[in-house]
Image (cartoon, rainbow, N blue to C red):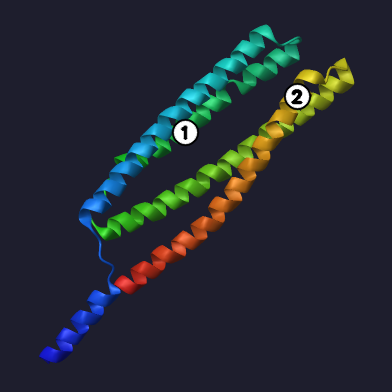
């Protein structure tokens, strides 16, 4: 029985990956620092874009409709940034004491990342469609396409990049979830 036990122990050791706790802790600390930096920078950028919308409402808008549109657009960037900040804060505050908790954390992080890019893609699509409608309206009513058409053209690459990033993150999430599930199955 002793030789069978040794053989099982050797098989287990060969299939179980070696995890260095110090490296593991450093990676988690680094990830938390990156999450904090991203969260605060998104809030700052969201605030800057919202302030620019208010500035444009006061100084650039030529009609009441334009002022209303800029006014309606101004809370969207800061609202999205605050929502994103809340999600990222949850991630950097979460502690992982065991490998199983870490795997649960990674799965949750993957889900949140997918949701973030999905909401970003749909939100930017709605804003882009709104800009397209306003550009068409400005061209047909005021024969003034320059301001809104420029905004539409400037936001088109952002729309395309966001959708491409969402598709990439979604595919990567599927692969990462399979890897985590495989790791869990081999651990059991």
Q: Is residue 151 left or right of residue 94?
A: right
Left or right of 126, for residue 42 = left
Say which quarter of the image contains residue 74.
top right
Give the number of callouts.
2
The structure residue drawn at horizontal position 58% and vertical position 46%, both measured from the top left corner, is 165
Q: Residue furthest top?
A: 59
Q: Is residue 163 above or below residue 158?
A: below
Residue 39 location (% of width, % of height) = 42, 33
Q: Position of residue 140 (x, y in %)?
A: 89, 22
Residue that mark 2 sits on: 150
Q: Is residue 146 left or right of residue 169?
A: right
Can residue 38 be seen by looking at this rendering?
Answer: yes
Q: CA distance from mark 1 to mark 2?
A: 28 Å
Residue 94 in view (yes/no)? no
- Mark 2 closeness class: few <14, some 14–19, many ≥20 residues within 10 Å: few
Earlier along the polypeptide chain: callout 1 or callout 2?
Answer: 1
The dot on residue 44 is none
In the figure, residue 146 lies in which quadrant?
Answer: top right
Q: What residue is drawn where x is 15% and y is 86%?
A: 5
Give the SS element for disc 1. Answer: helix
Tell me if residue 65 comes above or below residue 14 in the rendering.
above
What residue is rendered at 71% in x and 35% in y? 156
Q: Is residue 60 above or below residue 3?
A: above
- In which quadrant will I find the C terminus? bottom left
Residue to which mark 1 is pinned = 83
Within-10-Å neighbours for mark 1: few <14, some 14–19, many 20+: some
Q: Are marks 1 and 2 in contact (CB under 8 Å)?
A: no
């Amino acid at each position: 029985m002793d030789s069978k036990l040794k053989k099982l122990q050797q098989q287990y050791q060969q299939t179980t990956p070696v995890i260095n706790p110090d490296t593991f802790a450093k990676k988690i600390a680094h990830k938390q620092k990156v999450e904090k930096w991203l969260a605060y920078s998104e809030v700052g950028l969201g605030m800057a874009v919202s302030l620019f919308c208010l500035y444009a409402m006061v100084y650039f808008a030529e009609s009441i409709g334009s002022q209303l549109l800029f006014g309606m657009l101004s809370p969207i960037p800061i609202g999205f940034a605050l929502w994103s900040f809340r999600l990222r804060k949850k991630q950097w505050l979460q502690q992982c004491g065991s490998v199983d908790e870490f795997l649960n954390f990674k799965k949750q992080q993957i889900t949140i990342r997918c949701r973030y890019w999905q909401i970003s893609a749909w939100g930017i699509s709605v804003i882009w469609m709104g800009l397209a409608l306003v550009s068409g309206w400005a061209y047909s009513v005021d024969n003034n396409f320059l301001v809104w058409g420029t905004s539409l053209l400037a936001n088109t690459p952002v729309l395309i990049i966001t959708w491409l990033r969402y598709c990439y993150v979604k595919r990567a999430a599927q692969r990462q979830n399979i890897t985590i599930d495989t790791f869990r199955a081999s651990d059991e």
